[in-house]
Amino acid sequence: MRIEDEIKNIIEKKDYDFWEFLKKAYENNIKLDIGHFILLNILIGVNDLYHKLSEKFGEEEARKILERNKIFAKNSDFISGEFLKDYIDRKSRVAVHNRIKDLKTLGFKIESKSGPFGGYKIVGYPEWFKK
């Protein structure tokens, strides 16, 4: 399993109901861009990948694999803001933070942690969202 291939597949995955997503954004007065969808795909996909790797290698080794690939922040199971910003083609992690805030407004449960061991991880989904 190549992590690079897994990440590419994660970003290209589009399994959720696009129209329901747009409807909820409209109801909450959130202006979406492709970055919202990319971040959501990465948060969900990396979470799934972490669980898959954990089953195969154990949680600690899975975390280290994702850390070595600069997906997880150092000594953490949070997805690095640096990693995320590169995928939405922005120079600032503020762009990531703003989109994460929007996703939280839509009902996604996303934990945020600041500092060098920080980042983001998805821990729950709104009822309307079909994963």
Image (cartoon, grey):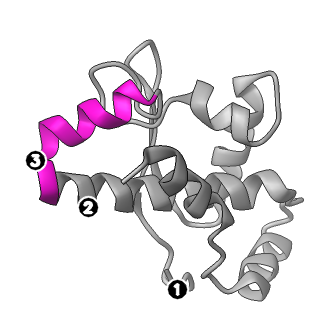
Specify which label sits upstream in the sequence, 1 or 2.
2
Q: Secondary structure at mark 1?
A: loop
Q: Is residue 22 left or right of residue 111?
A: right
When asked about the image quadrant of residue 115, the answer is top left
Q: Can residue 113 be seen in this snapshot?
A: yes
Q: Which residue is mark 2?
A: 52
Specify which label sits upstream in the sequence, 1 or 3.
3
Q: Residue at x 62, y 71 (%)?
A: 13
Q: Is residue 115 left or right of residue 49?
A: right
Specify which label sits upstream in the sequence, 3 or 2.
2
When the figure is inspected, residue 64 is found, relative to residue 6, above or below; the finding is above
Q: Which residues are magenta?
A: 55-69
Q: Which residue is mark 3?
A: 58
Nearer the observer, 121 or 26 = 121
Q: Name the amino acid type tagged 1.
A: Lys
Q: Is residue 116 left or right of residue 36?
A: left
Examine the residues drawn in magenta and state their main secondary structure: helix
Q: CA distance from mark 1 to mark 3?
A: 28 Å
Judge depth for marks 1 and 2 and give the one in front.
2
Q: Can residue 109 be seen in this snapshot?
A: no
Nearer the observer, 60 or 105 = 60
Give residue 130's mark: 1
The picture places residue 116, in percent across and down from the top left corner, at 43, 12
Task: Say whether marks 1 and 2 touch (CB < 8 Å).
Answer: no
Q: Name the amino acid type tagged 2.
A: Lys
Q: Name the amino acid type tagged 3.
A: Gly
Q: Residues within 10 Å of mark 2 (few under 14, many from 20)?
A: some
The picture places residue 73, in percent across and down from the top left corner, at 41, 24
Q: How many marks?
A: 3
Q: Is residue 119 left or right of residue 107?
A: left
